[in-house]
Image (tube, grey):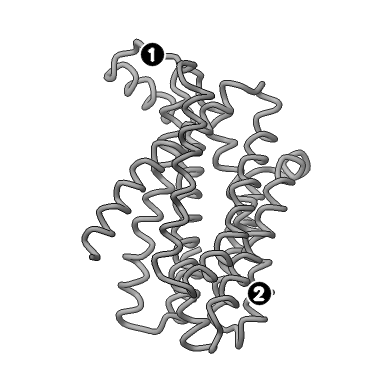
Amino acid sequence: SFPILLALRGVQGACFGALMPLTITLIGDAFSPEDRSGAIAGRQAILTASEVVLPIAGALLAALSWKAPFLVQGVNIPLAGLGLWLLGGRGQSSATEPKKYTRALIQVLRDQRGMIAVLLTGFARFLFKFSVLAYLPLILVNQRSATLVQVGIVISGAHLVAAVVAAQVPRLMERIAPSKLVMMGIVSIGLAMVGFAIAPGWQVALAVGVLYGLGDGVLSVLQDSYAIQTARQHVRAGMISVSQTARNLGKLLSPLVMTAVVAVTSVATAFVVMALAA
C-alpha cells in the first residue's frame, strides 16, 4: 500500500541522510588539504555516473513491473555487509559534549560567512534538481509524446555531462574564482529550466540537458569542497552534516513548491518560474 511504501522510503531517506555526510567526512580525514578537492570531485563523478545508468535502468525495469526498481535495490544488502566487514571497528569516538560541539559549530558558521552562501547554493541546486527529476518526465511524456526510455536517455545524458564536468572542477578552480563558478552554474541551470519548458521534443531536451549538466556538475563539487576545506577538524563532521541538511531541505521543498505552482499554472510554466528564481 502507499502508506507502507511512504514509511519505507522514510527509513531509506534517514539512512541515506546519515551515510552521505560520513563519506565526505572520511575524505576530509584521509586526504591532505591540497588533495581534498580532487577527492571530492572524484566522489561526485562516481555518484553522478550512477545517475547516468540508473534512470535508463529504472525505466527498463519499470516497463517490466513497477516493483522491479525496488526489488533490485536488494543488492545493497550484501554490499552493506561487505562494508561492515572491511570498515568495522575502525571508527573513532568523540568525547566532546553535545552542547560544546554545537557551540563550536555555530562559531564556525559565524566565522565563515561565505558558508551561508554555499549552503544556499546547495539548497538551490537540489530545489532545481528534484524539480527536473520529478516533473520533466511529465512534460516529455504527457506533452511531447516521449517514451519512458527516451525520458531516461534525457536525464542520463544530463548526468553524464555533470559527471564529466565534476571531475574537472578542481582544474577550473585554479583558473576561475569559485564565486564566478557558482554564478555560472546557477545561470546554466536556470537557462536549462527554460529550455526544458519550451523543448518541442525529447531530442531537443537531450541537448538542453547538456547545459543543465554543466551547471549541476560545477555546483555539485563546489559546495562539498568549500565545506570540507573551511571546517575545523573537530567540527568537520558537523559542518558536513549542516551542508547535507541544506541539500535535503531543497529536496523536501522542491515537490511542495512545484506542486503549489503547478496548481495555478502548467508544468512548463512552472519550470520558467523556477528559472526566474535561479
Residues tagged 1 and 2 counted as in contact (Cβ below 8 A): no
Nearest to N terminus: mark 1 or mark 2: 1
**Quadrant into which the N terminus falls:** bottom left
Q: Which residue is mark 2?
A: 206
Q: Label 1 to label 2, Cα distance in Å?
A: 48 Å
**Percent x, y of residue 21:** 46, 35
56 is higher (above) or lower (below) than 35:
below
Q: Amino acid at mark 2?
A: Leu
The residue at the far top in this view is 95
Answer with the quarter of the image where residue 131 lies: bottom left
Please, is residue 191 above or below residue 172 in the view?
below
Q: Is residue 211 above or below residue 163?
A: below
Q: Position of residue 215 (x, y in %)?
A: 63, 58
Does 181 sit left or right of 77 as displayed? Answer: right
Q: Residue at x 62, y 71 (%)?
A: 153
Residue 79, position as x, y percentages in the image:
51, 38
Q: Closer to the camera, 266 or 44?
A: 44
Q: Amino acid at mark 1?
A: Ser
Q: Local crowd at mark 1 within 10 Å, few (<14), some, or many (≥20)?
A: few
| Residue 184, position as x, y percentages in the image | 65, 57
Looking at the rendering, which quadrant does residue 134 occupy? bottom left
SS label for mark 2: helix
Task: Tell me the residue at 41%/59% (across/down).
Answer: 70
Q: Residue at x 42, y 30 (%)?
A: 109
Is 58 in front, or is 71?
Answer: 71
Secondary element type, mark 1: loop
Instruction: State the mark number for residue 94.
Output: 1
Left or right of 9? Residue 31 is right
| Residue name at image x 45 percent, y 79 percent | 138
Q: Quadrant of residue 107?
A: top left
User: In front: 100, or 97?
Assistant: 97
Position of residue 43 relative to residue 138, above or below, is: above
